[in-house]
Image (tube, grey):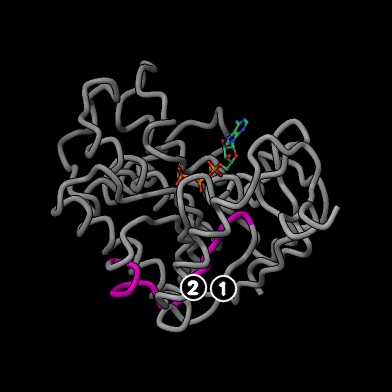
Amino acid sequence: MALRVRDLTLGYDRHPAVHHLDLELAGGSLTAIVGPNGAGKSTLLKGVMGELPPLEGKIERGAARVAYLPQLSEVDRSFPLSVQAFVAMGLWHRTGAFGGLSRADLARVGEALAAVGLTGFERRPISALSGGQVQRVMFARLLLQDADLILLDEPFTALDAKTAADLLAVVQRWHGEGRTVLAVLHDIEAVRRHFPETLLLAREKVAHGPTDTVLTAENLFRARQMSEAFDDDANVCVRPAERGAA
Ligand SMILES: Nc1ncnc2c1ncn2[C@@H]1O[C@H](COP(=O)(O)OP(=O)(O)OP(=O)(O)O)[C@@H](O)[C@H]1O
């Protein structure tokens, strides 16, 4: 078991965004999180990462090391670091934050950059990269983190087809290595093609399991309806049916 979530409610200022979620991910599974805008997908990743403490319920991580890729729009690209220094941060679990980089470490950074097609970019400042190149650099850093559980928030959004295909190959490599991957995605067809498992989320769990059984027209319709039914201004954790009955 890589991740077990029990009756999890997550939110902001006690305003719930994910409600009463139960979920279990097997070690080595490759799972997409799909759902309408505002469904709580990014919130769930932040909860699993430990950035957002649960309002209720529990998160148990079976994985020793967890890595997280935020949405590209949340990445601060203005800081003055070279591509090499940025990617080398992925080795902190080995070197410590202030450890120097050995020749072998630099070779690892070079290999990670080669794996994402950025050989030769070592000395470039992060601020001088395109969005797609930044996403490649983020993946290179993840490669070095050597995590058992990898959380990706919209990893292929706003990328050209070549970059998306290259980075999907990295995800498939992680899957082949037995790592557990959980990725928020909006491209339903890509999920059907490449992700064996899916969690369909609309603040609550709509369905979780093999992708072809989860992404049915009925479930997608229900997800849209459930998402619209929630009152965004509610500050207590009440389901719509309970609210109607009150
Ligand atoms: N930092 C925050 N402070 C307050 N509310 C937030 C914050 N982040 C998200 N929310 C709210 O929590 C709810 C879920 O947001 P979340 O970003 O998890 O949805 P999502 O499914 O990832 O959406 P999208 O597909 O649009 O990225 C939304 O109602 C959103 O407005």
Residue assigned mark 2: 219
Q: Is residue 124 left or right of residue 162?
A: right
Disc number placed over residue 18 in the picture, else none: none
What's the residue at 31%, 25% (across, down)? 82
The location of residue 227, given as percent across then percent down, is 55, 53
Residue assigned mark 1: 207
The location of residue 236, given as percent across then percent down, is 81, 42
Label 2 with label 1: CB-CB less than 8 Å: yes
Magenta highlight on residue 198 = yes
Q: Which residues are magenta?
A: 190-203
Disc 2 is placed on an element classified as helix
Q: Quadrant of residue 51?
A: top right
Disc 1 is placed on an element classified as strand
187 lies above or below 136? below
Instruction: Give how far apart the Cα atoms at labels 2 and 1 are.
Output: 7 Å
> Type of residue at label 1?
Ala
92 lies above or below 198? above
> Type of residue at label 2?
Asn
